[in-house]
Amino acid sequence: MNLFDVYPINPINIVRGQGSLVYDNHDTEYLDMYGGHAVISIGHTHPHYVKRLEDQLHKLGFYSNSIEIPIQKELAQKLGKVSGKEDYQLFLCNSGAEANENALKLASFYNGKKKVIAFSKSFHGRTSLAVAVTDNPKIVAPINETDNVIFLPWADEAALEEAFKNNEISSVIIEGIQGVGGIQVAPEGFLQKTRSLCDQYNAVFIADSVQCGYGRTGKFFSHDFAGVDADIYSMAKGMGNGFPVGGIIISPKIQPAYGMLGTTFGGNHLACAAGLAVLETIEQDNLLQNAAEIGGYLIKELNKLEQVKEVRGRGLMIGIELPEELAHARKELLNKHHIFTGEAKPNVIRLLPALNLTKAHADRFLEAFVNVLNQ
Ligand SMILES: Cc1ncc(COP(=O)(O)O)c(C=O)c1O
């Protein structure tokens, strides 16, 4: 049997990793400034993570949501504490798309409305509702098409106000920093406007934090920079440091009912152990502060490079926009300097490394990047 060939891949076989370094089957070392697509939050094979998963695996890997699972409550407590959203409620699932799917559905259950506002260049996942609110017609199949989604231009307050006027809006879904869209930071005023319109029209504010959340920007949720609380935050990627776990946290104003949401695998014992290991490490090692400091340092240094068109982002979620003639830079970083980075079209290099990236590794990236720019 062949694999279903949907990924354009680099011919590299990574077989092991430690911290921000990974190694291929020839033992060549690579610097991981991509975090396996913003997933590796506390570094590859972090000892506390390995131990917590190993210990849990020896006890119990899985049992269904039909029984008490105290480790879920432990995870909810810790998440409340680290994120500062202590009065929110946690629903666990397995991926970012699924988190958004549940968020959009829950919003509609809550207010009985159907229409969703999403934004140009948004990416929210590939399942039916998640892809319907994603602004990329190429990945929307005919069966996913719906009249329930209204796409608005990014950060256009007047358009937002206008779209609310007929009072049909169930929810607004917005990334605090667009990731796939090229690292575009949502203006604080726009997030505040979204909050006040959602309040005025009884709509649900969904903060997609799958990529920009979990401490990546130096605050737990990037929407926190605007000083507003969303009604639902969706999370995945960094939440399990590679173990597939996602979730939504839900404001106390939205009440649960049996059967409203559900999942077989979501919140299983192993996933919760992974999630706890991540939060404990974020807390113990002060990783929000590290993300802010090392990210701030990278942004400052990158801004000094005159070949760079624009540097965007916050903390360790950074977009470097390059002119067309430097479109080869990302490949050169990988092939010549053995540094993984992410991309966004057109010509944006995305940096999404582990939150415990060291200054030495940041400098190693900067040195290689300057070298690539000056060739
Ligand atoms: C902002 C955002 N939302 C949702 C998703 C979908 O997450 P997943 O691939 O885990 O379904 C992604 C994935 O890149 C994302 O960046």
Image: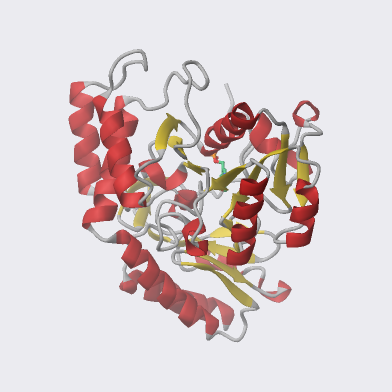
From this view, report whether residue 173 is shown above or below residue 363. Answer: above
From this view, report whether residue 271 is shown above or below residue 27. Answer: above
Nearer to me, 45 or 304? 304
User: Is residue 214 visible to us here?
Assistant: yes
Nearer to me, 278 or 189? 189
Report the residue at 18% width, 31% height from top.
55
For residue 221, side relative to residue 176 (left or right): left
- Residue extending furthest front? 200
Give the quarter of the figure containing the C terminus. bottom right
Q: Ligand 1: give its quadrant.
A: top right
Give the quarter of the figure containing the N terminus. top right
Where is residue 5 shown, x and y percent of the image? 64, 34
Where is residue 277 shown, x and y percent of the image? 26, 43
Nearer to me, 87 or 372? 87
For residue 167, side relative to residue 84 (left or right): right
User: Is residue 357 visible to us here?
Assistant: no
Quadrant housing residue 364: bottom left
Quadrant housing residue 100: top right
